[in-house]
Image (cartoon, helix red, strand yellow):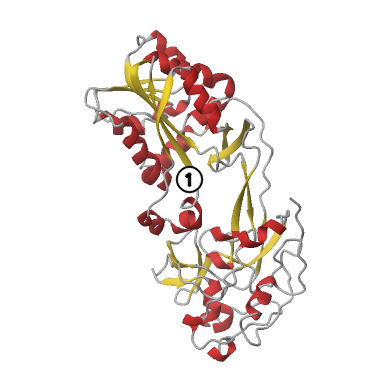
Amino acid sequence: MSFGQLEFNNCFYCEQYAKHIHDYPMNSPSLFLEGQTPRCYLHGQYVCDTCKNPRHFNGISWCPNCKKFTCVRCGEEKVNPKKFLVYGYHYKIKCIHCDQWVNTLEIAEFEGKHPFQVGDIRPKFDIMVWYPLTMIQFKNLQTLDEAITNESISGRKRIQDMIPTNHGKSLAINSEGSLQTAISEQKQNPERDNPIMRWSIIAEHYHEKFKQGGDWHHRELIIPYVMKLLNPASSDKILDLGCGDGNLCKLISSKCAKVVGVDPSDMIDFATTNGHKNIVYHKSSIQSLNEVYPVNYFDKVISNMVLMDIPDDEIETTVEMVAKLLKTEGIFVFSILHPCFDPVSRKTMKVPFDSEKNTDRIYLQQNYLKHDIKKIEVIAGFPTFHFHRPLSFYSKLLSRHGFAILEIEEPIPDENQIRMFPREIWNDYDEAPLFLYVKAILLK
């Protein structure tokens, strides 16, 4: 595939709007001149008054009451799926100061409520600002509700002919109308070291972040599906392989006879029983459990988001030990990042690079069959390792140790979850599963 770079004499967004609006002014691009969507200051970035980070104008709103910017990362957001001009949907953001719901700036401009239009902010640079005086300005339209076209400027439709560039420095507008410099983060190439040590380093930070049930992935997708496949019975003795700080152990313990949690990292130092006498923790590898528990001791084994963190030279012996500790016809349930869509084997491309819309992003699958490793920041600034392996690896691994796969789940968020977390799910996780769940039975 070859990628080309488009050339623009005018702001990318100004050109798109001018196709549908009479006398829409053309501003010269001043920002992101080396990218695929050079833009004017009006259609650039604005600084959130809460997090102080610059955001694309489709991911930030201006509250006319508080005179503050709020971005989708700080304020509660919801999706309005109604089409408008070249947009398939847009965000509304709740102002964190007064709780008023406000459209993002991309829609505010067409409502005549952009801070440049109403005079709340006076740009400290030359720019032509459009005012929606009459509907006659919209070509062949009588009302805003009719402002729908068959065209789309979604990045997915243009991305095949483009490739993101290193944007370096960018400029964003703050609530005083001044420019703020933001430096794009450059990721380092991953290098392998001790995965267990990595988890020990972030143990306290992880525990603090997830002790209240974790993020929406854990609460809404991971835990419900894990519990569904595990289906703990009152007589079950269950091993939680890679139990971390013991949250899943505590959840399982009320439904079974005994839970054993094992984890070699310092994560387990934060594990508690909360008064459940049927929970036992071991700070060790699973191989050490052979000295504590007899062969065929456990009815079920659960490994939640762990196997992907185990290096190739250790995962074989890990599953071998699971088979030894399980009873015949015992159940092994595990969850991992979906190998087809994990961040190691796919390349993320977004046009514009700073857009907050998932429709401007596309995932390209690369090196799916290759075993690979990548650092992932579960906690910002503290990367851990993810080991990518294709689906066939896990299937053959289970078969070598006497397992047969009973079920595979690829959960997709439901409508309620999409409403709760629109920016993260809409046109993304509702189209491709982020997680894979496997339930296997030991036949020998």
Viewer-proximal residue among 57 and 413: 413
In the displayed structure, 60 sits above or below 274; it is: below
Mark 1, Cα crowd under 10 Å, few <14 / some 14-19 / many 20+, is some
Tally the numbered discs: 1
In the displayed structure, 125 sits above or below 57; it is: below
Where residue 25 appears, as percent x and y from the top left, is 68, 83
Picture quadrant where residue 270 is located: top left
Viewer-proximal residue among 404 and 241: 404
> Could you tell me which residue is drawn at 66 percent across and 62 percent down?
158
Viewer-proximal residue among 65 and 384: 384
Where residue 114 appears, as percent x and y from the top left, is 55, 78
Residue designated by label 1: 433
Q: Is residue 52 visible?
A: no
Q: Is 65 left, or right, of 191 in this rendering?
A: left
Say which amino acid is labelled 1: Pro
> Could you tell me which residue is drawn at 75 percent across and 55 percent down?
3
For mark 1, give the secondary structure.
loop
